[in-house]
Image (tube, grey):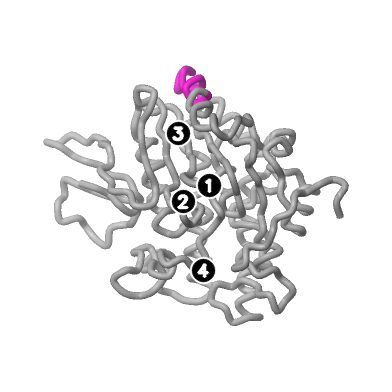
Amino acid sequence: MGITAPLRPAGPPEDTATVAFIGRAVFTHEGSTALQDFDCQFEFVGYELVERGRVAVITLDRPKQRNAQNRGMLVELGVAFERAEIDDTVRVVVLRGAGPSFSAGHDLGSSDDVRERAPGPGQHPTYGCDGGTLGGVESRHRQEWHYFFENTRRWRNLRKITIAEVHGMVLSAGLMLAWCCDLIVAGEDTVFADVVGTRLGMCGVEFFGHPWEFGPRKAKELLLTGDALGADEAHALGMVSKVFPDDQLSDCTVEFATRIAKLPTATALFIKESVNQTVDAMGFSTALDACFSIHQLNHAYWAEITGDRLGIGTVEHGLEDWRLAPEILPAGKNQP
C-alpha cells in the first residue's frame, strides 16, 4: 500500500491489517508487525539509493520554479525522509536540488501553489486539516507549525546523518532545509540569503536558526539588509563543512557521504545526539519555539495592516517588490 501524504486517518481503517499515520506505514502480516518500504509516486521530489543502499539521495525536483517549496513538495519530502529513516540499510541521507538552485524558498504563487490552496478537487488535502479549515490567525498558525516549523525540526532530529548538498541560490526557506541537516556542503558559486525581511516585512523564516548559524550580529545584518553570503564566507562561519567545484559537487558529496557511512550507525547517532542535545541545552529548541511565536505575531501584524490573508508586507510600506526578484547584494565588509 502506498502512502502519498502524511495524513492522520479520519477513522479506523477498513482493513485492520494496515494502519497509516503521520506518513509512516505499519504493515501486519499473519499476526506479525513489520515496517516495510513506502511505495510512493513522487511528483515533486526524487528518491534513489546509491553506494549499495547505504546512501539515500533525495532531490527537490521543481527546477523551473527553482525548487520553491509548495505544499506537495514539503509533504513528499517528509515521506522521503521517513522512507530513508525506516530503511536500516541507509546510513546517510543527502538532500539536493535539481536545476539551477537548491531552493528559492517558499512558493508564494505558482500555478501549483494556487491550485493546492484553492477549494476544489485540486486542493492539497493538508489544507483541509491541521487547522486549515478554521480561518484567520489560527489557520495560519497551525498550518505553518505543522508544515513549515515542526516538520523541519523533525528532520533535524532524523535518526540518520543528513547532508544538504546546496548550490546556486539558497534563499529564505531554502535555508531551513539546509539548516535542518547535520552537515552542509556547497558548490563554489552558492549564495545564502534570507530576504523575507526586506521583501515581505517578516522577521526571518519559521525555523529561526539565524543567530546559531550566522552569529547574532551577522544575523541582524543579513536580515535587515537582505544581503547574501557566499560559500567561502559560510565555510568560514562554520555553517558549511565543505566547498566543492560546482561541476564536481554531486560526486564529491556522495564520496563524503560514503566516508561517513563507514562509521557504525550507533556511533554516528550518538555523535549527532551529543551535539544536538548540547545545542538544545544551550537554548536552541526553546529559542526556536519563541521565535516561531514572534513570526506568527509578525504575520498577524501585516494581516491587520494590509488585509492580505497571507499576512505579509507590501511595497506601499517601503518593502522591495518580491515579484520582481530584486538583486541580492553580497554582504561585503567594505560596502554600505
- Residue to which mark 1 is pinned: 100
User: Taking 196 as reference, is 53 above or below it?
Assistant: above
Mark 2 and mark 1 residues within 8 Å of each other at the beta carbon = yes
Marked residue nearer the N-terminal end (2 or 3): 2
Q: Nearer the viewer, mark 4 or mark 3?
A: 3
Within 10 Å of disc 3 (Cα), the crowding (few <14, some 14-19, many 20+) is many
CA gap, disc 2 and disc 3 = 21 Å
CA gap, disc 2 and disc 4 = 27 Å
- Residue to which mark 2 is pinned: 63
Marked residue nearer the N-terminal end (2 or 4): 2
What range is drawn magenta here? 256-268
Marked residue nearer the N-terminal end (3 or 1): 3
CA gap, disc 2 and disc 1 = 7 Å
What's the amino acid at mark 3? Val
- Residue to which mark 4 is pinned: 140
User: Taking 60 as reference, is 8 above or below it?
Assistant: below
- Residue to which mark 3 is pinned: 93
Mark 2 and mark 3 residues within 8 Å of each other at the beta carbon = no
